[in-house]
Image: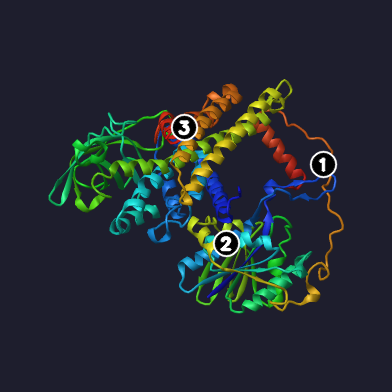
Amino acid sequence: MNIIVCIKQVPDTNEVRIDPVRGTLIREGVPSIINPDDRNALEEALKIKDKMENVKVIVLSMGPPQADVALRETLAMGADEAILLSDRAFAGSDTWATSTALAAGIKKIGDYSIIFCGRQAIDGDTAQVGPQIAEHLNLPQITYVEELKIEGDKVIAKRALEDGHFVVESKMPVLLTAIKELNEPRYPSIKGIYNAYSSDNVKVLSAKDVEADFDNLGLNGSPTQVNKSFTPPGRSGEGEILQGSGREAVESLVLRLKEKHLI
Amino acid sequence: MDFNLTKAQQMVRNVMKEFTEKEVKPIAAEIDETERFPIETVEKMAKYNMLGIPFPVEYGGAGGDELSYAIAVEELSKACGTTGVICSAHTSLGCWPIYKYGTEEQKQKYLIPLAKGEHLGAFGLTEPNAGTDAAGQQTTAILDGDNYILNGSKIFITNGGQSDTYIIFAMTDKSKGTRGISAFIVEKDFPGFSIGKIEEKMGIRASATAELIFQNCKVPKENLLGKEGEGFKIAMSTLDGGRIGIAAQALGIASGALDETVKYIKERQQFGRSISKFQGLQWMVADMATEIDAARLLVYRAAYNKANNLPYSKEAAMAKLFAAQCAMNVTTKCVQLFGGYGYTKDYPIERMMRDAKITEIYEGTSQVQQMVISAAVLK
């Protein structure tokens, strides 16, 4: 059974600062990491591999050549193979163009039972790429997975909703998106790191290699364009301090929140 | 000349940073306070091959190098000197002598579980009356049929009582002085071997420091490490490498203390502004950062030399001498910058100052390092 895990290399937003004048990210000196939700997706795939026989975990990413580091890290965690889709034709892709490219990469791999993505990336926060891949490939999808079981040829996933859960069953192949509650990702092992750098397990493929649809790639193939990004000004308006004992203050707070229909 | 780490070494650093932040830092104060040996951390380090970094994969190691090992000890020690020395003593003193001097059978039997981290290792050279003068060994080993019979005791043994495998030095021929010392691999369950006093210490308090007692302890002949009479050479060459680990520990303590201090003095307000805005303190920070970087270059050079089969005895001694002084100097200044709060257990900085002191003492005092360095310079 092949599990394909899609990952994105992102700037570590804990360390990102915003240029106050231009409103853009200052990327200089900011470390790059594997998108956190994607690490959960990979961990779950690796857990399945730990438990079941004949499972192969293939990691797929689209990005610049520097994303090689992120892919080596997935190998150091235990993935079997990594594929980087890297081509000038992909530059400036929005979610549509990205999912087009990734779906082409997945078709090229061909044989798979599960495609695992993170829920969303911390730099764009769209949560669109996973579901779009499923649409491109005509696959069932289960998003926001916080628990997963595999039984025979189907998966049973618990989906987190804002105020409850769905338990959903689907036949494989299926696309899943992971949330951080799903598991605690392992660290890359030191042996894994040295293996990852001594082997030739990261394959780089171009748009042509995966026979991607050039009309739907990169900046030109992206239906959305970013015109401007800015930091919204801070809200004016004054805060209010609730007086009295702890109990009185809490009661008064609860009352006000109820009045505003917030709780 | 290239000052860049390899990509693998950079990733080792990132992983060690994250591991330290999540697994080591949160319990550092508690294990110091209660003197509890952090067995759970040892198990986690084993799982990720952090206890056999410089050894080949076929012997249970991670297939890394001496520099990535030094980086690992440095990162662990940034948050916890205890965890740093557990890793260092195990790797440099417990595993390395078997890797370097062991027979194939000894490597299969002892090195593999050690380098995998399934077993923990320790090194017993120091005795009550044989500290810096290691040649004054009183412990004896007499060959009797298929066994050596060991009698005597060792003190201040790091990982003592927690280890499964001990490298023990004893006199096989007193008349020959240092050439009469031999090394043995001793298992914790060998009859006649027991653990004596566990030391209560000023710093690295959660690390186990124990007395080892040998009363007619039977050690099979095949557990002789190297040849009879090679013990002193084995001990000295092991300590040459061990010093890189301790230098890395000292470097980590200094570097971790400065990180904490930078955070603190940016937040701490006096006279209406952050105390980091005062030039007098800025100059202290500049000096500390410079000293730490100099220590780092010395430590990495020694590790690089060892990894590349270049001479490293003098280099390791210089690294340890300088990094240990740096750790003591920097942590003392950092406590000063924290002021009254730095003297309390509300902040980690007093612990770091207590942890720093041992780096000037064990695996050769600073004065021993000076002896090694001057001997190399004046030869």
Q: Which mark is residue A234?
A: 1
Q: Secondary structure at mark 2?
A: helix
Identify the subunit bearing mark 3.
B
Identify which residue is drawn at 42% across, 55% down: B55
Q: Give the spatial CA distance, label 2 vs label 1.
A: 39 Å
The residue at which mark 3 appears reads as B355
Q: Residues within 10 Å of mark 3 (few under 14, many from 20)?
A: many
- Amino acid type, residue under disc 3 in the picture: Asp
Residue nearest the observer in this picture, A141 or B168: B168
Residue B143, above or below B275: below
Quadrant of the rendered image containing residue B259: top right
What amino acid does circle 1 point to? Gly
Residues marked 1 and 3 touching at CB (< 8 Å)? no
Q: CA distance from mark 3 to mark 2?
A: 36 Å
Residue B75 visible (yes or no): no
Q: Amino acid at mark 2?
A: Thr
Q: Which residue is mark 2?
A: A74
Q: Earlier in the sequence, mark 2 or mark 1?
A: 2
Looking at the rendered structure, the secondary structure element under dot 3 is: helix
Label 2 resides on the chain identified as: A
